[in-house]
Image (cartoon, rainbow, N blue to C red):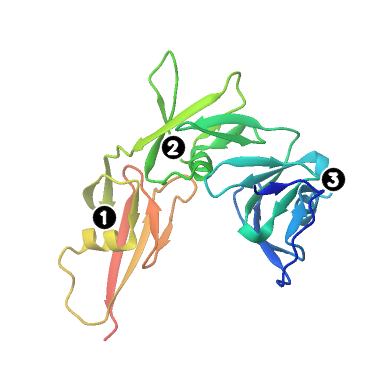
Amino acid sequence: MTIADTAENPATTARSSFTAQIADESFQFRDVEFDDRKVTGAQIAAAAGAYLATDYVVLLHLLNHEIETVRPNELVDLQIGPRLFVIKGDGTERFFVDGLALEWPRKSLTGGGIKFLAGKDEDLDLLLEREDQPDKVIDDDDEVRIGAPGVEKFHTRPAQVKVTIIVNTRPKPWTKKRISFAEVVALAYPTPPAGENIVYTVGYFDGPPHRPEGSLTDGESVRVRDQMVFDVKFTDKS
């Protein structure tokens, strides 16, 4: 069990501190250190700046992607290096992803947030199940109301992507949700330029709403959208 009753005697340990990852509804995690191996929900809320714990919901995100609500007097074992959310609210809304029951303290959540909580690869499509209409594909940036009457159900499937991106003014078909720095360079220069010290720069615009323009460096990738534009240049540093 990851949550223990406060009556349990905490196990002694030689470690001087324990770390938990804590985020709010923005999914921006930060490492927080505690002196004790087991801490209460109220202590977790206070560490996140929520000193009136009854006004906040503390969620434990388990390794199997299940979510448990932590009451103010319950203990969480930090030995497992848990990931936690502290979000203002007085209850949670339930929803399902591929049969996995999840909960969230807000009445809406983005498609990307739903996939993150369910542990689903971002390259998968997320679909909202509907009885009287075809299932609706939910983009990562789409806000979905999960607090509607009834319980929302979602399922995932391999992505069905077919877009055209513009690389150095030339249209290129693309069938994945993301494109990496190396993939953009390969599209721009199928035959690499001669030289032993070639350095590439990749810029883009007309990208996804949360990151419509920017640049990529080696090892990075970005979500694509139809008619997204990439500009790839190279210099010879020899």
Marking on residue 75:
none
Dot 1, crowdedness within 10 Å: few (<14), some or many (≥20)? many
Say what amino acid the circle numbered 1 marks.
Val
Measured along the vertical axis of the image, is residue 61 above or below residue 218? above
* Image quarter (top left, top right, bottom left or bottom right) of the C terminus: bottom left
Residue at the disc numbered 1: 167
Is the residue under label 3 in contact with that under label 2 (CB below 8 Å)? no
Label 1 vs 3, first from the N-terminus = 3
Whole-percent x and y of residue 158? 32, 39
Measure the C-alpha gap from mark 2 to mark 1: 23 Å
Dot 3, crowdedness within 10 Å: few (<14), some or many (≥20)? few
Residue at the disc numbered 2: 139
Q: Residue 20 vs residue 218: left or right?
A: right
Measure the C-alpha gap from mark 1 to mark 3: 52 Å
Q: Residue 55 vs residue 24: left or right?
A: right
Is the residue under label 1 in contact with that under label 2 (CB below 8 Å)? no
Whole-percent x and y of residue 100? 50, 34
Say what amino acid the circle numbered 3 marks.
Leu
> Most extreme residue toward the top, as rendered?
132
Measured along the vertical axis of the image, is residue 146 above or below residue 79? above
Say what amino acid the circle numbered 2 marks.
Asp
Q: Residue at x 45, y 19 (%)?
A: 130
Tell me where residue 234 sits by quadrant.
Answer: bottom left
Q: Residue 18 vs residue 191: left or right?
A: right
Residue at the disc numbered 3: 52
Q: Nearer the viewer, residue 41 or 131?
A: 41
Dot 2, crowdedness within 10 Å: few (<14), some or many (≥20)? some
